[in-house]
Amino acid sequence: MKPHKHFLKVFTFVMIIANIWGMINYDDIFDRWIRFGTMGLYFLLFISPWFYNKKGLLIFVLFLISDGLLINYEDPVFNAFIFIIRGFSYLLLAGIVIKLLRDLKTNFFQKIVFTIAFLLNIFLLYSLVEMIPSGEQYSSFDFLFYFYGISIIACVTAAVSYSNRYANKPSLIFLGTILCLVFSDLSYFIGFYLNFSEFFIVDRIFNFLGIALLLHFMLIFGETEKIKTDDLLKN
């Protein structure tokens, strides 16, 4: 049984509006609780028969935990765990498609472009760290931020390679998922550390769009795996 084709779109639209309303009318702590509650609802959707896929269970659990920890984001301990959990979440997301890319062949020029892009992203990470006020940093902040940033780079690279290799609906949805989640994290980073509060709204929109796309990807990916399993049983 599949959900109604517009259910996830309507649900996500309602969640985004509810969260923006909460951001406008309540303080930061209560607003973060609203975000956590919304992520809890998405988690319940994921474990339903509609969207559940065992490969995504740990990812959704980690996203739920990180949103819970976000309530106390200013605390260095909670902050450190968020970087660790989000970093592992992106690595797990990349792991979903890595097996599909094992036979991907690249030429020398592509390797050069990839190396330059990777080094450029490392430089951007360094620039972002330098922009953070010293009062917001703690002893292990730089290390954890670089781990988190490199995890994102690896995940985006895997998503782009997956999309270029297959250019089908699942690959495009996966790429959209990763880009939305990355834009969400970047927007929250700008909003919190650089004091541009408007970016919190952008963060919330991209975050729930990314989670909704991830649910949709899990639905399609699960159906594809089922078809492959059925074909193997027939043979």
Image (cartoon, helix red, strand yellow):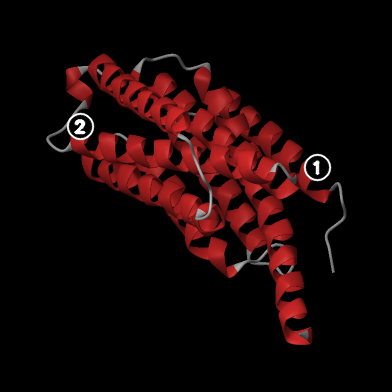
Q: Amino acid at mark 2?
A: Asp
As drawn, is 59 to the left or to the right of 8? left
Numbered disc 2: secondary structure: helix
Picture coordinates of residue 51, whole percent (x, y): 70, 62
The image quadrant where one finds the C terminus is bottom right
Above or below for 47 versus 131: below
User: Residue 220 sits in which quadrant?
Assistant: bottom right
Q: Amino acid at mark 1?
A: Val
Q: Residues within 10 Å of mark 2 (few under 14, many from 20)?
A: some
- At 41% from the left and 35% from the top, the residue drawn is 153
Image disc number at residue 10: 1
User: Residue 53 sits in which quadrant?
Assistant: bottom right
As drawn, is 55 to the left or to the right of 87? right
The image quadrant where one finds the N terminus is bottom right
Nearer the camera: disc 2 or disc 1: 2
Residue under numbered circle 2: 142
Above or below for 225 versus 81: below
Q: Nearer the viewer, residue 13 or 88?
A: 88
Q: CA distance from mark 2 to mark 1?
A: 40 Å
Q: Nearer the viewer, residue 16 or 173?
A: 173
Q: Nearer the viewer, residue 139 or 151?
A: 151
Q: Earlier in the sequence, mark 2 or mark 1?
A: 1
Residue at far left of view: 139
Inspect this view and state whether residue 107 appears: yes
- At 57% from the left and 24% from the top, the residue drawn is 201
Image disc number at residue 93: none
